[in-house]
Amino acid sequence: MRPPLYITMHERDNVAIVANDGGLPVGTVFPSGLTLVDKVPQGHKVALVDIAAGEAVRRYNVIIGRAAKAIPAGSWVHERLLDMPDARSLEGLPIATVKPPPLAPLEGYTFEGYRNADGSVGSRNILAITTTVQCVAGVVDFAVKRIKSELLPKYPHVDDVVGLEHTYGCGVAIDAPDAIIPIRTLRNISLNPNFGGEVMVVSLGCEKLQPERLLPPGSFAIVDERSEPQALDVVCLQDDAHVGFMSMIDSVMKAADAHLQRLNARRRETVPASELVVGVQCGGSDAFSGVTANPAVGFCTDLLVRAGATVMFSETTEVRDGIDQLTSRASSPEVADAMIREMAWYDAYLRKGQVDRSANTTPGNKKGGLSNIVEKAMGSIVKSGSAPISGVLSPGEKAKQKGLIYAATPASDFICGTLQLAAGINLHVFTTGRGTPYGLAEVPVIKVATRSELARRWHDLMDVNAGRIADGDASIEEVGWELFHLMLDVASGRKKTWAEQWKLHNALVLFNPAPVT
């Protein structure tokens, strides 16, 4: 049986988290001499010293709250004992003040990817069928099942067929200023590098989001085998030519067959690791997220940046309380200003809904030891590593540069994943402490467990066990390198993630802050 263990994040912290599986009972004595006066669940905080009422409670050397009443040493410190601090003002922030020495280039690493005509590289070779409106979702789903069973076996070099179903397209204020967010999100998802430049659309006909509005001329470039530009390929269900349901299905399958033929002619080729475009995200977070999985991802993020790749971190409410850390790491004042604009926009968005960032934390987060959004944010930010932040994307925009990028998104797992798809990721990394079967059909998702107990129970859902860091069996650096090598194998198609093997994926959820009519 393991001896009692707590983990501190900084020498100035006055709380630590209990590391032992199942937590520890009253009367437990730690090697330091600290004695528990409460039963403390795994991942939850214990007071290392007496904390007076109103005194700051520190974790990560950050004030995560003030004691609502006196807290004796050895007590369980949970959300009911903490008064959350106000959000950091967006005024007077440090701007591009951190100037670390350049990270040494990481050369010689490659993967086998699909080179696209626009220069991007896919990790998979997938036919995606774009939908302009939810009304056609049932038809597309029926057609995709037929395509997979009848057509896909003829094209062994095509990995999958997916319908880009969503809940947008009609019954919305299509001309509202914020409507650009869901529209450009769907447009850029349709152009994700894993789809090989093959754009196929199924439309109803009467919807507000008409195909030419979604993908206007010049927004995409499709090239056939003769290198001649092609018109947008649209199957419109309301066309007079469609007599009966099966006529619609036949049209979708005929169009799909032409795209599958071109995709099937593609082959993987060796490309540098700099062609990776990786989205990092966390969900079902617990107190170990910021101790094991997220620091390992952060170390891997630095490796990817050193290799010349693109990495994007997101989840606005989960980094808002560390805005000063982010603006100080900006590569330029312009990048810092862009981050501040995104935070201010989201603050206003939440105020309009009469909530603030504290609405983020879930019952599962709290059960996993995270008392509030401040503590959660400190553990979330470390996924971004230590590299300078070189760019900022508004929701739905596509990345056009290398390096570490802040892609502004809501923290909702499926909305964040959808927006990172639009930003152009060809690989996704997702850390979890409570556990979630989250996945995406459009890109491989590597799942990283924060605790060994979760990795054991969900042995066929978690791809990497970062819990070994807390167990003392591996270092942050070792798990970071393991993740880096796994990314190259997954991007090359040499390995499949568990989510891919089980074909687990979440629906696309477009972020639509505009009114619904």
Image (cartoon, grey):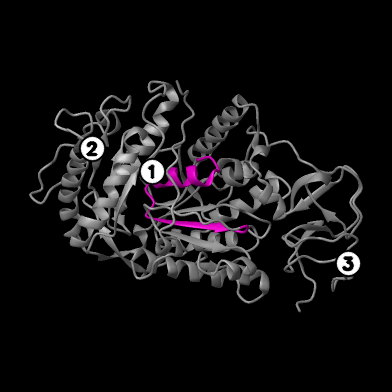
Residue 374 lies left or right of residue 161; in this view the side is right
Q: Could you say which disc has been placed on residue 245 in the image?
A: 2
Task: Give the residue at mark 3.
Answer: 34
Q: Which callout, 2 or 1, points to the residue nearer the camera?
A: 2
Q: Earlier in the sequence, mark 1 or mark 3?
A: 3
| Residue 320 visible (yes or no) | yes
Q: Tell me the magenta residue range.
A: 409-434
Relative image position of residue 337 (x, y in whole percent): 52, 35
Q: CA distance from mark 2 to mark 1?
A: 31 Å
Q: Dividing the image into 4 quarters, which one contains the C terminus?
A: top left
Q: Position of residue 309 (x, y in %)?
A: 40, 57
The amino acid beneath tag 1 is: Ala
- Name the mark on residue 123: none
| Nearer the camera: disc 3 or disc 2 | 2
Dot 2 surroundings within 10 Å: few (below 14), some, or many (20 or more)? few
Q: Distance from label 3 to label 2 (Cα)? A: 71 Å
Rendered view: 369 above or below 239:
below
Q: Amino acid at mark 3?
A: Leu
Q: Residue at x 42, y 62 (%)?
A: 502
At x 27%, y 57%, the residue is 125
Residue 205: in magenta span:
no
As measured in the structure, the alpha-carbon distance from the residue carrying label 1 to the one carrying label 3 is: 50 Å
Residue matched to label 1: 422
> Position of 87 compared to 236: left or right?
right
